[in-house]
């Protein structure tokens, strides 16, 4: 009865392994994804990258619109029909009169902003026709005539800052900042994808190791079963072999679940449907690269985009200080215009007797007392400037600290790779020797299981060490913006501008 039960479990395990072989064949049938291909897929589908790219496009369009607003603007205002009939009182003659007006007019205007001075020059022409009739007591007056008013106008603020130039500068900073954020998002996405990509690779690799464990456990089970059947070993050994086989099967099933979960996480980062089946391929063999710490720190401090962001923050704080100091400011406005007006009943004779219409206006806004509002806001803005400068200094320290720590981990991993490789070779030799002893009956099932576990652990550790080295090398590449494998600097913003 016990033998029958054991054979039933053994048959079920064989069926499960056959099912896993089917899964393996499906995975092989899928088009494998390399790390380069994964990054290309994420470039088009990753939600965070898409959001950052849309933000960049928004600021780019704002900049295009702002620069377009500095060019000449043409406008045409039309009033095709205006009719009015009203009763008014004439203060000069102390009498009431009725006024009826029917008119039509249009104004054409060309305005050119002046970026250098924040002024504006405009050429304006207003053309119209009116039929005006007034009736007072027994007197009727009526006028039907064409009129045209053509003049050149200049408006110029004085004793204040150039608002138009500052607004353009702020939008340029916003666009540059958006470009930096997009470039940083690309780098961060590259790190996230690389980590998850190698996690899937490790789970695939661990699945193969678990299959190998299962095969070894099955082989051990067959060996001990034959010995038990031949009365060469005690039944307790068969029970232990059964436990080992069940444990290997459970580990195999858990690894299948782990692989599916890590694949789903990778698909989420890549932005592909979760229903798609994927498999990854990678070359995790590494050639350790010698990295000079001083050069890495210098590259990071001279190239990191976060430092440029802090510089932008400082410059924006300076612009904000100018705006704050202009609160309740003494300022003035100058308006100059010169032109001619003509009117006549006949259109061709509008300028028969033209009238010049020069105009000069100067106005001032003089603050009196603001209860200390401006002074307090200026002090608050100075504090904000100090904070921005401190953040820039702290950012430099953080960059150097991250580079130094990553460099140390990288150097340590170079040593760990050699040790892990030797451990795998030694564990394989140890397992092969003890497997022979197990077949000869010198070892128990528990002992051979421990050697199998040791071999699997060393293989997993070796693969993980290689992957850790690749990831840390990528971290150092992003922290210092320098590719030490190719020996070339990385300029993400320049690459982004070239792409745009």
Image (cartoon, rainbow, N blue to C red):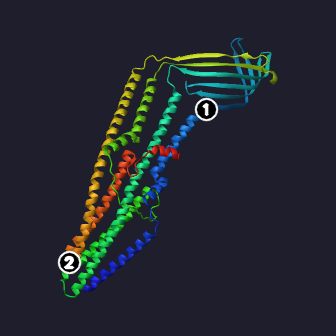
Relative to residue 245, is residue 38 depicted above or below?
A: above
For image coordinates 39% across by 74% down, the residue present is 21
In-front residue for pair 11/29:
29
Q: Position of residue 261 (x, y in %)?
A: 37, 62
Per the model, the C-alpha gap separating discs 2 and 1 is 90 Å
Q: Quadrant of residue 78?
A: top right
What residue is at 41 percent from the left and 35 percent from the top?
311
Name the spot of residue 440 as percent of width and height, x first.
20, 81
Indicate which disc, 2 or 1, sits on the residue closer to the N terminus: 1
The residue nearer to you, when weighing 289 against 216, is 289
Label placed on residue 497: none
Give x and y (percent) for residue 155: 59, 22
In the image shown, does 105 or 395 lie closer to the viewer? 395
What residue appears at the point 66 percent right and 32 percent down from the top-left corner?
Answer: 74
Residue 289 pos. (x, y %): 34, 52
- The correct choice, above or below, for 393 with respect to 214 in the image is above
Image position of 139 (left or right of 178): right
Describe residue 363's horizontal placement relative to residue 404 as left or right: right
| Left or right of 167 in this view: 130 | right
Q: Which mark is residue 437?
A: 2
Mark 2 vs 1: CB contact within 8 A: no
Please say whether residue 249 is visible from this viewpoint.
Answer: no
Assess disc 2: are there few (<14), some (14-19) or many (≥20) residues with their C-alpha within 10 Å of its C-alpha: some
The answer to whether residue 33 is above or below residue 144 is: below
Quadrant of the snapshot with the N terminus: bottom left
Q: Which mark is residue 71?
A: 1
Instruction: Please say if 491 is above or below 442.
Output: above
Tell me the quarter of the picture where residue 382 sits. Answer: top left
Residue 320 position by quadrant:
top left
Q: Secondary structure at mark 2?
A: helix
Eye-nearest disc, 2 or 1: 2
């Amino acid at each position: 009865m016990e033998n029958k039960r054991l054979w039933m479990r053994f048959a079920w395990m064989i069926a499960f392994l056959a099912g896993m072989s089917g899964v393996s064949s499906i995975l092989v049938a899928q088009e494998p994804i390399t790390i380069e291909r994964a990054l290309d897929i994420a470039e088009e589908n990753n939600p965070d990258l898409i959001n950052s790219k849309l933000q960049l496009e928004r600021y780019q369009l704002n900049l295009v619109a702002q620069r377009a607003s500095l060019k000449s603007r043409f406008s045409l205002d039309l009033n095709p029909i205006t009719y009015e009939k009203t009763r008014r009182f004439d203060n000069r003659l102390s009498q009431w009169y009725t006024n009826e007006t029917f008119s039509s007019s249009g104004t054409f205007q060309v305005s050119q902003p002046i970026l250098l001075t924040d002024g504006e020059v405009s050429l304006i022409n207003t053309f119209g026709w009116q039929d005006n009739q007034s009736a007072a007591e027994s007197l009727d007056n009526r006028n039907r005539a064409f009129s045209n008013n053509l003049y050149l106008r200049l408006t110029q603020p004085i004793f204040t800052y150039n608002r138009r130039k500052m607004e353009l500068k702020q939008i340029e900073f916003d666009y540059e900042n958006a470009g930096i954020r997009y470039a940083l998002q690309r780098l961060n996405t590259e790190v996230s994808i690389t980590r998850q990509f190698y996690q899937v690779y490790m789970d695939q690799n661990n699945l193969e190791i678990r299959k190998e464990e299962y095969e070894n456990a099955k082989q051990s089970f067959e060996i001990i079963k034959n010995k038990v059947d031949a009365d060469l070993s005690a039944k307790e050994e068969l029970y232990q072999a059964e436990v080992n086989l069940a444990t290997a099967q459970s580990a195999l099933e858990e690894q299948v679940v782990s692989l599916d979960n890590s694949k789903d996480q990778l698909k989420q980062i890549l932005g592909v449907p979760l229903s798609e089946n994927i498999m990854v391929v990678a070359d995790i063999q590494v050639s350790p690269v010698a990295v000079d710490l001083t050069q890495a720190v210098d590259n990071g401090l001279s190239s990191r985009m976060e430092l440029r962001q802090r510089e932008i923050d400082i410059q924006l704080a300076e612009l904000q200080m100018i705006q704050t100091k202009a609160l309740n400011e003494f300022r003035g406005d100058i308006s100059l215009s010169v032109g001619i007006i003509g009117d006549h009943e006949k259109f061709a004779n509008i300028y028969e007797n033209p009238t010049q219409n020069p105009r000069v206006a100067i106005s001032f806004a003089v603050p009196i007392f603001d209860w200390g509002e401006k002074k307090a806001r200026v002090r608050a803005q100075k504090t904000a400037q100090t904070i921005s400068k401190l953040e820039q200094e702290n950012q430099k320290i953080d960059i150097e600290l991250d580079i130094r720590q990553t460099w140390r981990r990288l150097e340590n991993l170079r040593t760990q790779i050699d040790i892990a490789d030797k451990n795998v070779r030694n564990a394989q030799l140890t397992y092969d020797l003890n497997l022979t002893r197990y077949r000869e009956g010198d070892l128990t099932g528990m002992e051979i299981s421990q050697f199998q576990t040791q071999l699997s652990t060393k293989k997993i550790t070796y693969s993980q060490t290689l992957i850790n080295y690749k990831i840390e090398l990528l971290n150092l590449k992003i922290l210092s913006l320098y590719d030490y494998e190719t020996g070339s600097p990385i300029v993400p913003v320049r690459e982004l501008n070239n792409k745009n």
